[in-house]
Image (cartoon, grey):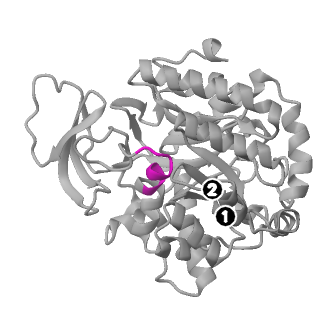
Amino acid sequence: MILRNCRYVITQDGERAILENADIIIKDNAILSLGKNIVAGPEDHDILDCTNCIIMPGLVNTHAHLGMHSLKGICDDKELHDWLSIVVPKEKAMSKRDVLANTLAGAREALLFGTTTIYDSYAFAEDRAAIFQSLGMRALVSSTIRKKEDIPAAEAMVASLCSLKGMAKKSLVTPALAVHSPYECEEDVVLDIVRLSNKHNVLRRIHIGETRKERYDVLNKKGKLPIDYLESLGFLDEKALLVHAIWITKGEVRTIAKHGAKVSHNPTSNMKLASGGVMPLIEMLNAGVCVGLGTDSVVSNNNLDMFGEMKLTGLLHKQHRWDPTVLPAQRILDMATRDAAACLGLPDIGSIEPGKKADLIVIPLAEHLLPVNDLVSNIIYCANGSDIRDVIIDGKIIVKERLIWERKIQERKVL
């Protein structure tokens, strides 16, 4: 496949180069080359005209719960613990078919908004994995563990998906392990997740430092701050993904950095649930912590538009720090592409470079994206998910002219 006449290519490579009037050649599932006036070979018969369009890496959402999709809007005005008391009973009433239908609906929404990779945690992991694979969407998939009896099924899922990925090199789904939180899970459950994550060499995720109440509950019960508690259990290393991490100290930030743990920042969800604090993002970045962006579920966000997440991230931290210079647009874009990919342990996506997987999105230069004085600024502060025209994942067109190509998926087979 060749993308012809790309007006701008935001490569997100090591130099953050932006190419003008360039072509991109995709061979199989990877970027073969990019540059001006590339001569196509006889095999490059699929041509996508990108005249007057921006091409950029697909967005990477580091935290979502798509299985909750049908609950959008049921609980807009509660803080987290009251919110949970309303939402959890609704979740328990959902059938397996409900969860899978929700996952499909959420995945479609995310795709149309330019998300090419998503980390999704909910029930029925193997069935949800089949949905992502059928759609042609890259995903990390886990079931959220709350109690000891959940663990055998989670390990079986990880072993099954690891085996599948080993046999099918083009599998788009990677398994992960997820423990809910220190306030819902006993210490032995967290320890089991650490053990299994190490055994299978997969990412482990936890909600941590989300509210002030959680912070003091953990301190009173364990005698340690939340991040220090995780450190004492051996949870923190390069495979750990810490979601939210709002109510933490500078010392805890240094602990995260020391162990190479990653962080998923979910500003819309945190603000909607009135979590009260603001994640110490600038301290994290200064300490070298890898931070990616996430939407969380549509019940605590209301949509899956990562462009909105990027804009809000910039506005929130500039306002909070009384400093408009603390978070440049380029840094925010990194958090939704190459840094988010690193958070999920996927080094072969997140930028447009020869050898990287061909996960790309195409954005026409609409009026609200002009004039182009600073293209990355326009992406962060002007663009939105509805601007996406085409989505390419693993070298295949998944969305074309804002329509999902249903070449592979048949809902009756995956629901």
Would residue 242 be found to the left or right of residue 23 on screen? right
Which residue is found at the position 20% from the left and 57% from the top?
A: 20
Residue 141 position, x and y percent, is 60, 34
Magenta stretch prevailing secondary structure:
helix
Element type at mark 1:
loop
Residue type at mark 1: give it.
Ala
- Cβ atoms under marks 1 and 2 closer than 8 Å: yes
Element type at mark 2:
strand
Q: Quadrant of the C terminus?
A: top right
377 over 151 or under it: above or below: below
Asked whether 169 or 202 is in front, the reply is 202
Kindly tell me whether residue 259 is visible in this rendering.
yes
Look at mark 2 in the image and give the residue it sits on. 242
Instruction: Answer few, some or many: residues within 10 Å of disc 2's Cα (few below 14, many 20 plus, some between 14 and 19).
Output: many
Highlighted range, magenta: 339-346
User: In the image, which disc is placed on residue 245?
Assistant: 1
Asked whether 209 or 331 is in front, the reply is 209
